[in-house]
Image (tube, rainbow, N blue to C red):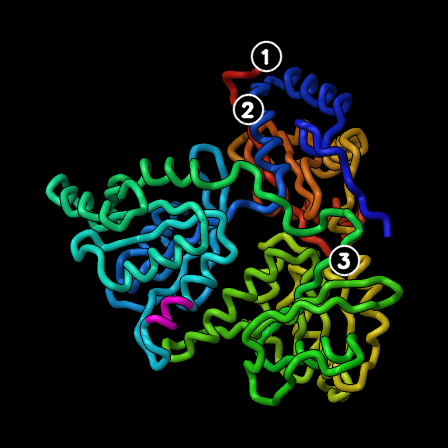
Amino acid sequence: MDDQNHDGDEHGELGDAEYAEFMELAAQEGFDPEQVESDLAAAGHGPLPVLAVVGRPNVGKSTLVNRIIGRREAVVEDKPGVTRDRVTYEAEWAGRRFKVVDTGGWEQDVLGIDASVAAQAEFAIEAADAVVFVVDSTVGATDTDEAVVKLLRRAGKPVVLCANKVDGPSGEADAAALWSLGLGEPFPVSSLHGRGTGDLLDAVLEALPEAPAQTFGAGLGGPRRIALIGRPNVGKSSLLNKVAREERVVVNEQAGTTRDPVDELIELGGVTWKFVDTAGIRRRVHLQEGADYYASLRTAAALEKAEVAVVLIDASETISVQDTRIISMAVEAGRAVVIAYNKWDTIDEERRYYLEREIERDLVQVRWAPRVNVSALTGRHMEKLVPAIETALAGWETRVPTGRLNAFLGEIVASHPHPIRGGKQPRILFGTQAGTRPPRFVLFASGFLEASYRRFIERRLREEFGFEGTPIHISVRVREKRGRKK
């Protein structure tokens, strides 16, 4: 397979001549050159840096996360242990984008406080580039906080200390007392009211890397990484054992046997692949099931390191909200995607009919993903898995030259112009592909493009250039009127 490695010059994946031509076009259309450069850089870099927000229960982590991402998305309630479910959000501050991981609070359980704190903190920090450690300044540093400090020191990740619940000048003395933790300056913040969050985020940007190292697809001849993901008991471990032709991992009818991802080098189709068998993701995890909750965090971490996500779905059961959520995790992580319908040997014609209807209804957003119908138990159609993975990787790495892309965009604008809204008709002026893995496009337009028109553009891009098995990211930059040349 042709591993497309592009020269990583200062223009991202654009060559010098192509970049110069593109910038000239941008200037002709009245765009600010510095802004265009910034937009290309933002769209063109690889995986975003990851910020983990950690702290014990009810210190205001989710409130802080909502403040950082600028919308009320993380569940907030005035009692400990509310956060369980989806943990990753995308945020932007001062023109820089990054991911925020909202972790669950640390609750005493049967394992004991020390084991609980260790498990929760280590897994959350594992995939992070930097950490915001949230402490309740009105309570001060507790023994639990001190235990977390030890873990943070051991992890060696940059830490920004957030002294939360400082609602006014009188609380700043409480915040100053947290210097005793030995993590440097405590930033006095009120997550609820927004006080001090700007200074905190400035410190976060200093702690986060500008351009994170690519943890996957280095193109140096190493094995490509495949994450097997899916809800519990869909047969991930059985599939891994079948492709490995031996019992590599524990298989049990009880859901949730796998806790830790198991990395396995396996030769398939004459190629060595690195498979990651991940713990199943549950829709809701209760406090006493802390190990399962952190298995889902580890699954997310494995997804971050992977290039391809093979999503297993139990064909014998109705496609569930959990299945669609897991697929969304893979898409949002920007991974190539293959959907494998397992236990195909167990279903009859009637179930196949209803499954097709469910796929049309529930998975319409990922109809671009290659599909394989397999049986991890019998090995049925296992030979189709590698071609599907290779197809998805090829789509993930596809690059369209700027000249060809703009000819294509010109045809679209001429044949299917954007609908007129409020007496105005926005127009795509030009565009470029700023990056691959996954393909990322930046379109420069004369006005705002509606979501339905963006989806239309994406659909036409797929029809024209393929992109099978990969999400596509499209960002639109609108020309400011004052910058337009007369």
- Local crowd at mark 1 within 10 Å, few (<14), some, or many (≥20)? few
Q: Secondary structure at mark 3?
A: loop
Q: Residue at x 56, y 72 (%)?
A: 260
Say if mark 1 contacts mark 3, CB within 8 Å. no
Q: Main secondary structure of the magenta part?
A: helix
In the image, residue 45 lies at what x, y percent? 62, 39
Whether 337 is drawn above or below 373: the answer is above
Q: Earlier in the sequence, mark 1 or mark 3?
A: 3
Residue 485, disc: 1
Residue where numbered disc 2 is placed:
35
Q: Amino acid at mark 3?
A: Pro
Q: CA distance from mark 2 to mark 3?
A: 38 Å
Foreground residue among 473 and 117: 117
In the image, residue 157 lies at what x, y percent? 45, 49
Residue where numbered disc 3 is placed:
223
Q: Nearer the viewer, mark 1 or mark 3?
A: 3
Foreground residue among 188 and 455: 188
